[in-house]
Image (spheres, rainbow, N blue to C red):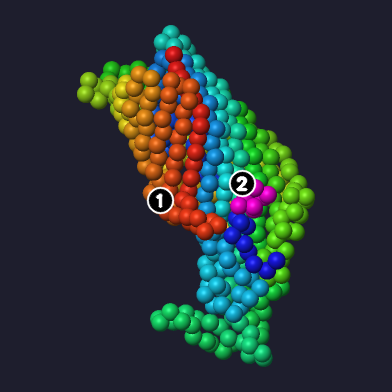
Amino acid sequence: MRKIPAWMSGCLIFLSSLGALEFGGIGNVSSGMGGAGVALSASPYGLYYNPALLSADNKTKFGYSIGVEYRQRNIDKLAGLNLKNIASSPRNMETLKQILKDNHLSLNSQNGIVLQLSSSIIREEFGSVALGYFGSMYAGISLNGDPNRMDLIVQNGANYYKLVPNNTGGWDEQTTNETDYKEHSLSYSLQQGDGHKIVTSTFILSEIPIGYAKTFYFKNSNFNIGVAAKFMNGISANQNIYLSDHMNIAHDLQNFVAKRNYQSYSTFGVDLGMMYEIDFPKFRYLSFGVVAKNLNFPTFKYDFGNIVIKPQYRVGIAYNERYFTLAFDADILPNDMLNFNYKKQQSQMIGGGFKFDLKYFDLRTGAMKDIRQDDGLILTGGINILGIFDVALQSGTKLGQTKGYKIPRYLNLKIGGSFSF
């Protein structure tokens, strides 16, 4: 098969895997409010967003959530490229070059269940505790291009020409030689099938966190500090094939499945969080939060290399009134994504939203933006009915194209439920 078909992206997601380890999100409340959760005292998912939230009130809370996320960058442009005859089309060569420079495609799933125990007596005398389970799968694909073999150099008989774009939208030809052609040509690297790789990987992460938080009371404010220790197990596999003009996509995908070799490694992680609550009459519901997740650099060691989860730092502010909540979060630093493109992929989220908490249901809406990725503005919303059924949706405004259909480059859907007493 010479041509990369439009369905290649979809097949590669399900038959292979890779993913990202940015801050992420578990639970529906924050997901519907632009991803904000670090200072959100009413959320049952403080164990994930900020362990200091565990002692923010006297309620026992329970929550569960199942989520799936789709994200891609430039991979959709592969559809329709004819690798066999790519040297005859400077435009297609330039398109492939740009894809190789900056790309990723991922299908991730973050799921969790949490139980937070608190009451006025326990909170004041001892503190609040929580126990949970977080299960995540990071799956996707990236093209790892050799930056030294991306020049648009073509052969015409015994002559060699380097194509350079001009101001008129065309191409100028510059004479070069056979050595330059073999060492730096994009089309020659595809003929040889030894320059650019399709890299796939799977990382399935299981976490069992135990959290503790304590509130310190002052005259006009409260200070909450919390810590979470978590057992972590990571199951991973890594595999790749070289991109070539004579590759058989169907056969190579079958080999992906047959040869996949999963490895397991266990370690632990530590999260630390703080929240400061204002206790003045006109500002009684205002809170500020900060969290540092994975402070100890949890490292998973495999034969193909190590996966290191670097610390993730986020700040947040929230107005936590009984029937109305407003919140905003921001990543302090960019987070590396688990991706094998030679250009490092990073994520850095900012966002917020509000929630109307009515008697039998609540409504949430908001917006967020990844300032390191080209997803556009990500709009969010959610609804909870009787605490039993909860759905949250996030959708980016920047569109890609698959099978002729335009879909957002970023989509995230969560279904779950939560209640407190």
Q: Which residue is disc 1 drawn over?
A: 397
In the image, residue 185 sits, relative to residue 60, either above or below, namely: below
Classed neighbour count for the residue bearing mark 1: other residues with Cα under 10 Å, few (<14), some (14–19), many (≥20): some
Check disc 2 and give the amino acid type.
Answer: Ala
Quarter of the image holding residue 209? Answer: top right
Quadrant into which the C terminus falls: top left
Q: Is residue 224 left or right of residue 146?
A: left
* Residue at the outermost front position: 404
Q: Which residue is at the front of the view, 182 or 71?
A: 71
Magenta stretch, residue numbers = 10-19
Task: Inspect the magenta stretch and tell me whether residue 243 lies in it.
Answer: no
Residue 43 in the image, given as x and y percentages of width and height = 43, 26
Q: Residue at x 72, y 58 (%)?
A: 250
Q: Main secondary structure of the magenta part?
A: helix
Q: Which residue is disc 2 drawn over?
A: 139
Check disc 1 and give the amino acid type.
Answer: Thr
Q: Residue at x 62, y 50 (%)?
A: 13
Q: Are marks 2 and 1 in contact (CB under 8 Å)?
A: no
Q: Which residue is at the front of the view, 296 or 77?
A: 77
Mark earlier in primary sequence (2, 1): 2
Q: Secondary structure at mark 2?
A: strand
Residue 409 in the image, given as x and y percentages of width and height = 48, 52
Q: Residue at x 58, y 86 (%)?
A: 161
Q: Is residue 192 left or right of residue 361?
A: right
Classed neighbour count for the residue bearing mark 2: other residues with Cα under 10 Å, few (<14), some (14–19), many (≥20): many
Q: Is residue 360 left or right of residue 228?
A: left
Q: Is residue 194 visible?
A: no
Q: Is residue 377 left or right of residue 109?
A: left
In the image, residue 346 sits, relative to residue 283, either above or below, namely: below
Residue 204 in the image, given as x and y percentages of width and height = 64, 39
Q: Which residue is at the front of the view, 28 or 129?
A: 28
